[in-house]
Amino acid sequence: MNRGNLGTRGCWVRVRGPTCNLLIVGIYLPPQYAKTQAVGILKRLRELLRESGSHGCTILLGDFNVRLPKKYSDVVGPYALHHNQMTTSLKTRQLLDIMTRNGLCGINTYFRPRNK
C-alpha cells in the first residue's frame, strides 16, 4: 500500500488487490479557493493519474465545486444539474479533461434524482 497527498485538500492511496489494483483519490476544492490553488491541485491530480497509467482501477471521490454540463461526451450523464455545454470555468474544463483522458465519469449524473 502506498499513499500520499495532493496538497492540503487532496490525498490518495494505492491498494494492491487479488484481481485489481486500486488507486483511490479524495479531493475537496472549496468554492472560495483562488483559481491558482484549484488549478495546482488539478495539475497534481493529472500527474498522479499519468504516473499510475492504465493499470488497475481508479476511484476519484470529491467535492470539486464545479458545474458539470449535461451529457458531456461519455463522462457526464443526462441528470447533471446544469445545461450549459460551453462552460467557461477553468476548473470545470480541467476536470472534464482529466475525466475524459482517464476514462472516468461523474457516476451520480447517470441516475435520476429523487423528487422531493
Image (cartoon, rainbow, N blue to C red):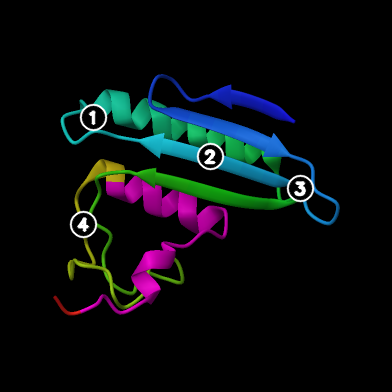
Q: 89 or 41: nearer the eye?
A: 41
Residue 21, disc: 3
Disc 4: which residue: 87
Mark 1 belongs to which amino acid?
A: Lys
- In the rendered image, is residue 51 in sight? no
Magenta includes 66? Answer: no
The tag earlier along the polypeptide, 3 or 1, is 3
Instruction: Give the CA separation, mark 2 to mark 1.
Output: 21 Å
Residue 103 position, x and y percent, is: 57, 60
- Quadrant, the C terminus: bottom left
Mark 3 belongs to which amino acid?
A: Asn
**Label 4 neighbourhood size at 10 Å, few (<14), some (14-19), many (20+)?**
some
In the image, is 17 to the left or to the right of 78? right
Disc 2: which residue: 25
- Please give the name of the residue rendered at 17% of the width and 80% of the height, measured from the top-left corner: 115
**Is label 2 or label 4 in front?**
2
- Please give the name of the residue rendered at 36% of the width and 76% of the height, measured from the top-left corner: 111
Identify the element where label 4 is drawn.
loop
In the image, is 22 to the left or to the right of 106? right
Q: 18 or 5: nearer the eye?
A: 18
Disc 1: which residue: 35
Magenta includes 93? Answer: yes
Q: Is residue 80 above or below residue 32?
A: below
CB within 8 Å, label 2 to label 3: no
Q: Is residue 54 above or below residue 31?
A: below
Q: 43 or 16: nearer the eye?
A: 16
In terms of secondary structure, what is the magenta stretch mainly? helix
- Quadrant, the N terminus: top right
The tag earlier along the polypeptide, 1 or 4, is 1
